Image: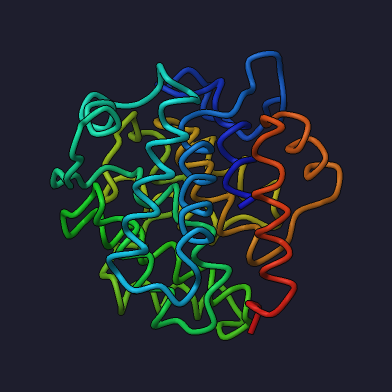
């Protein structure tokens, strides 16, 4: 989850095509801050832990909804899209057919803590369906959680194996390079025009920082592209300690126990 939050924070000053489409930018500046992407990443993890790792669909979805609404109405209040803002405030929130990239940016914890790929994909699907129940929204969440699982377990030892898996299982076009994507890429918030680009940045990057810089250099919805790519890079490369400290310094105190619980669960047995 740290990778997603760092990608979000680092990308936040350049959202809405405010960057210069270069990898040469300060990792942190006065405008670097967590956004709704980080809040929802934490919320999904809280929901999963509240439900329990063996929870059925009804309980898992209920707890994810509860915690998304809890955090969504406390943090990053001005940054949610219109339909999601309405969902947060609804008396009886229902999924609304979204294929937005929110389902993919908030799913990273699920990729880390379940013991099998099948269970990972199942819970990732549930986490999307509470809002993003369009097939593309579900696919975005499943694909990102799956890559994290494959990378952190070592079931795919190379990026080529990961790429081949994604193309076969999810049908994303990963044939373009970042140099081919960058000149024409713009701010867009759909899974189908965000997830493949973030995966491509991960595939091209040489370490955690380079993945995040590559993702943000594409432009567009940089905090979300950064969050997705950062979550993948963390699973494959890990995160340098100075960046972990930077992350902890830039998030609310209330979130830190969630991250500690997440680390304890993974180190304590969820890791395969």
Residue projecting furthest to the top: 30
**Residue 2 in sight in this render:** no
Q: In this view, does 63 lie above or below 152?
A: above
Q: Which colour scheme is used?
A: rainbow
Q: In this view, does 36 lie above or below 209?
A: above
Residue 127 lies left or right of residue 27; in this view the side is: left
Q: Is residue 267 left or right of residue 158?
A: right
Q: Position of residue 181 (x, y in %)?
A: 38, 44
Image position of 88 with respect to 136: above or below = above
196 shown above or below 118: above
Q: Residue at x 45, y 63 (%)?
A: 51
Question: In the rendered image, which quarter contains the C terminus?
Answer: bottom right
Q: Where is residue 221 in the image (x, y as percent from the top left)?
A: 41, 32
Residue 184 location (% of width, % of height):
33, 34
- State the image coordinates of residue 121 (x, y, percent, origin top left): 37, 73
Q: In this view, does 8 lie to the left or right of 237?
A: left
Q: In which quarter of the image is residue 60?
A: bottom left
Which residue: 34% across, 29% down? 187
Q: How many labels does the image show?
A: 0
Q: Can residue 39 be seen in this view?
A: yes
Residue closest to the far right: 242
Along the viewing direction, whichever of 140 and 127 lies nearer the viewer? 127
Question: In percent of the image, x 30 and y 32: which residue is there?
Answer: 88
Q: Which residue is drawn at 23% across and 24% down?
A: 82
Q: Depth check: 96 or 229 in front? A: 96
Name the one closer to the observer, 53 or 18: 53
């Amino acid at each position: 989850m740290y990778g997603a939050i760092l990608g979000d924070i680092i990308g936040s000053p350049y959202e809405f095509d405010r960057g210069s489409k270069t990898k040469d930018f300060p990792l942190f500046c006065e405008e670097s801050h967590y956004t709704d992407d980080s809040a929802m990443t934490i919320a999904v993890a809280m929901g999963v832990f509240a439900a329990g790792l063996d929870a059925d669909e009804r309980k898992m979805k209920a707890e994810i909804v509860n915690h998304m609404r809890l955090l969504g109405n406390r943090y990053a209040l001005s940054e949610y899209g219109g339909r999601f803002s309405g969902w947060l405030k609804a008396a009886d929130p229902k999924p609304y057919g979204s294929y937005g990239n929110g389902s993919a940016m908030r799913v990273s914890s699920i990729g880390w803590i379940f013991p099998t790929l099948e269970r990972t994909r199942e819970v990732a699907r549930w986490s999307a369906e509470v809002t993003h129940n369009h097939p593309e929204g579900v696919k975005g969440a499943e694909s990102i959680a799956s890559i994290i699982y494959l990378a952190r377990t070592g079931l795919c030892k190379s990026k080529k194996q990961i790429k081949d898996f994604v193309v076969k299982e999810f049908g994303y076009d990963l044939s373009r390079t970042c140099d081919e994507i960058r000149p024409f890429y713009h701010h867009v918030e759909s899974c189908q025009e965000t997830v493949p680009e973030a995966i491509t940045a991960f595939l091209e990057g040489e370490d955690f920082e380079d993945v995040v810089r590559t993702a943000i250099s594409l432009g567009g919805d940089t905090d979300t592209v950064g969050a997705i790519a950062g979550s993948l890079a963390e699973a494959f490369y890990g995160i340098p300690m100075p960046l972990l400290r930077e992350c902890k310094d830039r998030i609310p105190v209330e979130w830190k126990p969630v991250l500690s619980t997440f680390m304890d669960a993974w180190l304590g047995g969820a890791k395969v």
